[in-house]
Image (cartoon, rainbow, N blue to C red):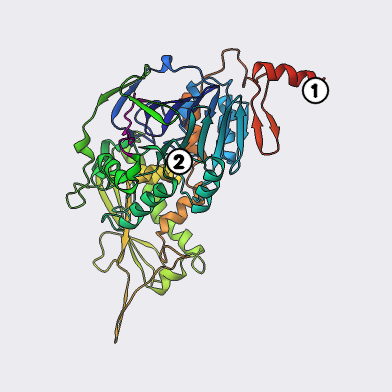
Amino acid sequence: MEIHMIGHASIFVKTKDCRILMDPVLWDPFYGGTNEVYPKREVIHEQIPEFDFLVISHKHLDHFDIRSLAYLPKTVDVLIPRDKLIENYLRQLGYSQIYTLKDFNEVKIGSTTLLATRSENRVPEYGMIFADESGVFWNQVDTILSPKTIQFVLSRYSKIDFFLATWQPMLEDGYQFNKSISFPYAIYNQLLYTISLIQPKAIAPGANGFKHVNCSSWLNQIVFPVTREQFCQDVKSVCPEIGQNVFPLDPGDILTFTDSKFYHLPKMCEYVRQVADNRESLAFSPVKLDAELKDNNPQDYDVDFLKKEVEKEICLKLPKFITENWGSLFIEHRKWKVIYQLEVTFPDGSQQWVFDFSDKNLQSYKGYNPLANFFTYITASGFYGLLNGTLSQEYMQGGYYRRYHKVYSVTSVGITYPTSTELIEEVLEDPLSFIFSANQQNIYSEKALDLELEKWSIPNRDGSESIKRKNPMIKIGDVLLKPTQELSLSWGFLKN
C-alpha cells in the first residue's frame, strides 16, 4: 500500500485494487483565509493522479473545501458520513455517485476493503481503514476513539500496520474565551493511551499540519502545545516495540508498506512540493503574546457602511432581542446582574457599548463602564459577516472573537459565582452567541458555503449538472461493493 501526504489531513492512498483521495484541501490559504498547510507546500493540481474514490471524513472546513471539490472530477464514487449538508453541496457541485456510510460500514473492491470507524465526536464523522493484501492502514482523522471501537477493529484485523494518528491537543479557543492555555496533560495522556491500546506496527502524526496566517498568526504561539518531534519521541516511549517506525510525514512525502515492512520516501510525490519549513513559528509559548485584536476586513466592506450596520444592530436590534427573551435566554444574566461590555474593532479603531441587565428598561450605552463584568471583543467585519450568514462561526476561531467574564456576587460570608456542571459548560452565554445562532441555525453557515460554491463552481464539460456512472456500487447489507469490470458484466447478466 502507498500513502501520499498532500498536506494537513489531505492524503492519497493506493491499494492493490484502487486509488483513494481523502479530505482534499488543495489550495492555501483555506478555512476562511485564516490557515495554510504547514510545512508550506505547493500542489501541482494538473498532475494529481486519477482516483476511484473520493472520501470526505466530516464537514469541518479544513476537510471539506468547496474550492478543491469544485476542481476535482465529478465521475468518482464519493463516500461521506450521514450529513445532509455535505451531500447537498456535493450534488450542487455536480457529484452524483454519493454514498453515505454509518459506523463500521464497509466498501469492497477486489481484495481491498474500506471500513468507516466510529467517532465519539458529536459532529457526523468517521475515520477510515484501508486494507488489502499488503496490510492495514487506519486513518484516525479527527475522530475520538473509544476502547470499544478499538476492540471491535482489532477483532476484525489482528494488527494495524500503519496508524495515522490524532496527536495534537489543540488549544483553539483557550485564550479567546479566557480558558486555560496551560499544557493539556490529561488530553495528551488520553491521545497516547489510545495509541497504546491499538499498538500499531508503524505510526505517523496525522492532520494538524497547518498554521494560522495573517491577523490570526499570533495564535501559533498558543494553539499547538506539542511539537511533532516530541510526539514521535513520546510514541516510542509508549510503544517501545514500534522501534524506528515513527514517521513525521511532510507534504510531498510517500510512505509504502507491505507485510509490515515500511519505506519512507521524502519529497517523492510528483504533484506536491514542500516549499518551506519554518517550524520555530509554531513554538508553543503561552507567556509571550502579541494578540491585539485587528480587523483586516477580508471582505473589503466600506468602513462607514460597517459602522452604520453595526450600530443599528447593537443600539436597536440587540436590546429588542434581549428584552423579548428576558424570561428565557437571559434569566441567569438578570440573576447575576450582568453588566455587559461589548467592544467592536473596526479597520480604523474601536467602539464600546454597555448593557446593564439589572436595568428593567435595558438599552445600550456608548462608552466604557468600570463596573462591567462580562466582556466581548469582536471585529466589525466578523460581526457583520456572522449576522448576515456570509461567515461561518468556525472563522472566528482565527482570534477575531473573544470573550470572558468575572461575574460574582458579594455576601457577608464571601463571594458566590456562577459555576458550570457536566451538562452545562457555560452558565452565562455571550448574548451575541444567541444572535449568531439565530441567524445561522448552526455554526456551519450554508450562506457562507453558497458563496464559496458560487465563487468556485465550474460547469461540467458536457454542460450537465452532474455526471452519472454507468456502474454504480451495489449495496449488500452493510457492505458497498464496487464492481470491477468482470463483476459488472456478471452482475448485468444476473439482473437480466
Q: Residue at x 46, y 65 (%)?
A: 424
Give the labeled residue for mark 2: 140
Numbered disc 1: secondary structure: helix
Give the labeled residue for mark 1: 495
Q: Amino acid at mark 1?
A: Lys
Work out whether residue 334 or residue 274 is closer to the camera in this orientation and state it.
274
Q: Write down the quadrant of residue 403 in the picture.
A: bottom left
Work out whether residue 339 or residue 209 is closer to the camera in this orientation and state it.
209
Numbered disc 2: secondary structure: loop
| Percent position of residue 358, x then y | 38, 72
Check the image and name the residue furthest to the bottom: 412
| Percent position of residue 259, x then y | 45, 29
Work out whether residue 196 or residue 374 is closer to the camera in this orientation and state it.
196
Q: Amino acid at mark 2?
A: Gln
User: Would residue 246 be counted in the magenta stretch?
Assistant: yes
Q: Earlier in the sequence, mark 1 or mark 2?
A: 2
Check the image and name the residue furthest to the top: 462
Q: Residue at x 64, y 25 (%)?
A: 482
Q: Main secondary structure of the magenta part?
A: loop
* 446 relative to 331, above or below: above
* 199 relative to 425, above or below: above
Q: Is residue 127 visible?
A: yes
The reply, left or right, for residue 496 in relation to residue 17 is: right
Q: Residues within 10 Å of mark 1 (few under 14, many from 20)?
A: few
Q: Is residue 375 visible?
A: no
Quarter the C terminus occupies: top right
Query: Between marks 1 and 2, how big is the CA–CA gap?
Result: 38 Å
Q: Residue at x 30, y 32 (%)?
A: 38
* Residue range corresponding to the magenta coloring: 243-254
